[in-house]
Amino acid sequence: VQLQASGGGLVQPGGSLRLSCAASGFNLNTKAVGWFRQAPGKEREEIVCIENPVGKTAYLDSVKGRFIIGRDNDKHTVYLQMNSLKPEDTANYYCAAGRICASAPDYWGKGTLVTVSS
């Protein structure tokens, strides 16, 4: 059983990235999936979580209007579309899966690093 976030990289301020979360060993379509991030020297914070089959939690205030979570059920993945990126978005981004968004995740993926810099 494994969860993996991908799609990170170096992007200029104002740019966009699309992160993807994929699972092996279980069907991600049947789980609630959350995106988290942790910047160097800071606490981990939850960005948003998408329920199964529908619904989502509120977005972290600092990303509202810029980030979008969604499912690609055909590919059994969950994405995080990140637009208008800012240097303060620089962090390791993680996805996690569980039964519902309100409960602690059962699975954590390895992170993908996002660096926003000119």
Image (cartoon, rainbow, N blue to C red):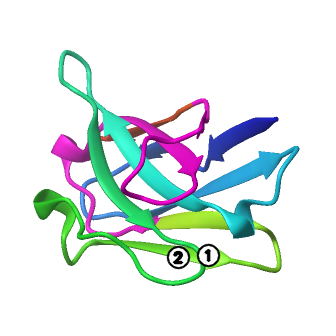
Given residues 72 and 56, the one toward you in this image is 56
What is the magenta range? 81-110
Q: Amino acid at mark 2?
A: Gly
Given residues 102 and 116, the one toward you in this image is 102
Q: Dot 2: what SS?
A: strand
Q: Position of residue 20 (x, y in %)?
A: 62, 57
Q: Amino acid at mark 1?
A: Arg
Q: Is residue 116 above or below residue 62?
A: above
Residue 35, numbered label: none
Residue 118 in view of the camera: no
Is mark 2 in CB contact (under 8 Å) with mark 1? yes
- Seen in the image, is 106 located left or right of residue 23? left
Give the quarter of the image for residue 117: top left
Give the quarter of the image for residue 52: bottom right
Asked if the stretch drawn in magenta spans residue 105, the answer is yes
Q: Position of residue 53 (x, y in %)?
A: 60, 80
Residue 39 in view of the camera: yes
Measure how far apart labels 2 and 1 are at the Cα level.
4 Å
Q: Is residue 101 above or below residue 11?
A: below
Which quarter of the rendering shows the N terminus? top right
Q: Is residue 79 above or below residue 9?
A: below
Query: Residue, x 57% and y 56% (percent of image)?
Result: 99
Residue 70, numbered label: 2
Given residues 57 and 14, the one toward you in this image is 57
Dot 1 alpha-carbon crowd within 10 angstroms: few under 14, some 14 to 19, many 20 or more: many
- Seen in the image, is 11 located left or right of residue 61? right
Give the quarter of the image for residue 31: bottom right
Q: Which residue is mark 1?
A: 71
Dot 2 alpha-carbon crowd within 10 angstroms: few under 14, some 14 to 19, many 20 or more: some
